[in-house]
Amino acid sequence: MSKTVASAGTTAVRPGTGLARLLRENPALRIGQDDYNINVTANYGERLTPAEVGDALREHPGAGRPAHLYFHVPLCAYICHFCNYVKRKVPGGAEGERAPRVWTDLLLDESGRRLAHEPWLAEASIESVYLGGGTASLLGSEQLARLVRHMRERYAISEDCEISLEGNPDNFLHDELAEACAIGFNRFSVGVQSLQSEVNAFAGRGHDAAMSLRAIGKLRATGKPFNVDMMFGLPHQTPAKVADDIRCLIDHEVPTITIYRLRNADRAKMGIGNRALWNVESVRDRLREEHRFPGLDETYAMREAIVELLLDAGYHPSPCGWWNRPGVYPDGNIPRVSRNKWQRHDSMIAYGPGAYGWLTRDDDTVVQTHNIADISGYARRLQEGPGLPLAFGRRLAGLEAIGLVLGFNFKANQPIDAARFRHRFGVELFHDEPFASVFAELLERGLVEPVPGEPESVIPTLDGEALHEEIISVYFHQRVGSFADAVCRR
């Protein structure tokens, strides 16, 4: 990367030197394709039983505090070959026609049980809502309206709450978006991944470039903010092809372009997802023998080509990987969902199979919550008796919690303020160990930089943003959280 840009309230970001060279200079951040499934949540800390998670949920002092609400819809019209999230293909016939109502009923049931179990939930200030999956838009207008009505009746939804709906291009080709806006959705996310027919066909995607561009036109017509998800590192991609895709999105004035590297780790083995087709050893080995997967250096060359175009067009990442045109969002140009989840690390209330959330408070403890990931098992748990569909949880305290929160803060690509950590955790980020040596190294390597006029704050550089997930894993989860495993799971 060779551009210098300025983010709101920060200094110009250090010019990059090329990601291939950056990886050579930082070999600990060079994480291979099959191990790359890292994000901001942690797989360390004290493991909790479902009963212990239930106790933590019930006793949490969340009334009056800001929170994020997430509903996971595990329905898909087709299964992408790279997807290892919790989902299933909608069946044909009458069963498929019933599926949207069945899953809406289950989500409403879980929400109702949680509200009864945790009275504070009705008094938490819900500042952002996200319906994801799977493919949340497959629920259709009638069932989406039931969910939004339930939220407004049972939760304290803030007046300016950001309510996001996720879908694929083939879900947004007719009147779906106008109907969603009428229901109350005011932000959208669409998974395009590639505009190249060969790439999409090989990955099992159910849309082509024409459908994607038509959906983008529909999204722009709503006047609401939206992001287009794009992947790099897929078979049949090259730096030139992904650059062509990004040029097209820029020309169509997409407000937010989110860029993701292919993650091919087996989440089913981790107990937090479904196995992707490309995770199957025989399939993965065959694709390797056929040299279908691009190498790591070529993968990052794709990202570098993307970023050069985005910088030239005036986009800036906020959070990391989410590149926004100027003025799309207020206060740091960051979506509310990202501000709640990552920048401020407010409590996240999550419903649906495999959904994960967390509880945060004004102390040094974080509790992660994980629902049953098996879709049939989740449904049976709700249909066959009382109780919550919890699988397990984790309690993080002290350095574990600080490492986790630092990772979230880094992901937000907003200033990391020492005063915040002094107030909550009683530590000095730039003086106490292990934090001081971590930030000294990040500064020396050009992965963070000081914020002008704010002597107690640093912010990721463009190089730091490029390798943000690797940095979160190696520097914050391992070195601060004192955790030995190199991979932190989403």
Image (spheres, helix red, strand yellow):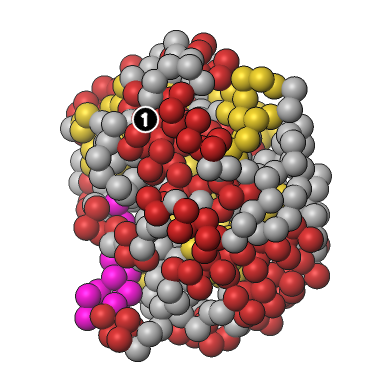
The location of residue 307, given as percent across then percent down, is 66, 61
Residue bearing the label numbered 1? 480
Residue 363 located left or right of residue 257: left
Residue 273 part of the magenta segment = yes
The location of residue 150, given as percent across then percent down, is 53, 39
- Residue at the spot 46% in from the left edge and 24% down from the top edge: 436
State whether residue 222 is above or below residue 368: below
Q: Is residue 121 visible?
A: no
Amino acid type at circle 1 is Val
The location of residue 96, given as percent across then percent down, is 40, 71
Q: Look at the image and tell me in which quarter the N terminus lies.
A: bottom right
Residue 133 part of the magenta segment = no
The foreground one among 71 and 115 is 71
Looking at the rendering, which quadrant does residue 156 occupy?
Answer: top right
The residue carrying pointer 1 sits among few (fewer than 14), some (14 to 19) or many (20 or more) residues within 10 Å by Cα, namely: many
Give, as a single range, the part of the protein colored magenta. Answer: 272-284
Counting labels gives 1
Looking at the rendering, which quadrant does residue 243 occupy?
Answer: bottom right
State whether residue 316 is above or below residue 157: below
Looking at the rendering, which quadrant does residue 482 occupy?
Answer: top left
The location of residue 415, given as percent across then percent down, is 63, 31
Q: Is residue 200 visible?
A: yes
- Residue at the spot 27% in from the left edge and 36% down from the top edge: 483
Residue 315 located left or right of residue 207: right
- Residue at the spot 75% in from the left edge and 50% down from the top edge: 4
State whether residue 44 is above or below residue 54: below
- Residue at the spot 25% in from the left edge and 59% down from the top edge: 268
The foreground one among 393 and 23 is 23
Is disc 1 placed on a helix, strand or loop? helix
